[in-house]
Amino acid sequence: SGVINTYNTTNDTSSMLDLIDKLLASLPEIQGVDAEEIENVKDDLEMVQEQLKTDNPKKNRIGKALVGIKKFAGDFSMKLAVTLTGADWGMLLQQLENFIR
């Protein structure tokens, strides 16, 4: 014992950034979702991306964007499920929740 898992302290922003890159790239492939909705979630993802790349991410801004990403993932879960990145949405949401906690 005495082993402390430190992976949570950095909250591994690099893995979140990888997921965001993947999700942004997958947006054009999502079928049957209004272009405006896609545009909105893209803005939210980019906002989070921007914050995660700074030395001192503003958690309240990430939190605001997270609300939009969550809504998108919830509203279009069936559409996202059939995409290659279907599972990545849930993974990103979980990691972001932990990050801003």
Image (cartoon, grey):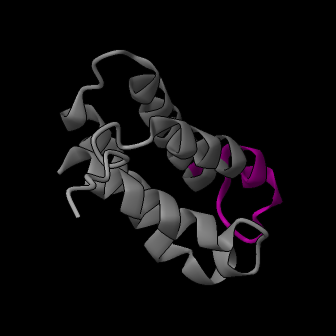
For the view shown, which residue lies furthest in the bottom direction? 78
Residue 75 highlighted magenta (yes or no): no
Q: Give the camera-side residue of 52 and 42.
A: 52
Q: Kindly identify the residue that appears in the image at 66 percent across and 72 percent down.
A: 86
Question: Would residue 29 appear left or right of 24 to someone viewing this image?
Answer: right
Q: How far across and how far down the image is residue 56, in percent?
A: 27, 18
Q: What residue do we see at 30% from left, 25% from top?
A: 57
Where is residue 39 drawn, in percent x and y? 60, 43
The correct choice, above or below, for 50 with respect to 32 in the image is: above
Over which residues does the magenta segment extend?
A: 24-36
- Compared across the picture, whether 50 is left or right of 62 comes to right
Return the x and y of residue 85 as percentages of the image width and height: 71, 65
In the rendered view, would you say 19 is above or below 17? below
Residue 39 appears anywhere in the view = no
Q: Is residue 75 above or below residue 8?
A: below
Q: Main secondary structure of the magenta part?
A: helix
Q: Position of residue 49 (x, y in %)?
A: 50, 31
For image coordinates 79% across by 51% down, the residue present is 28
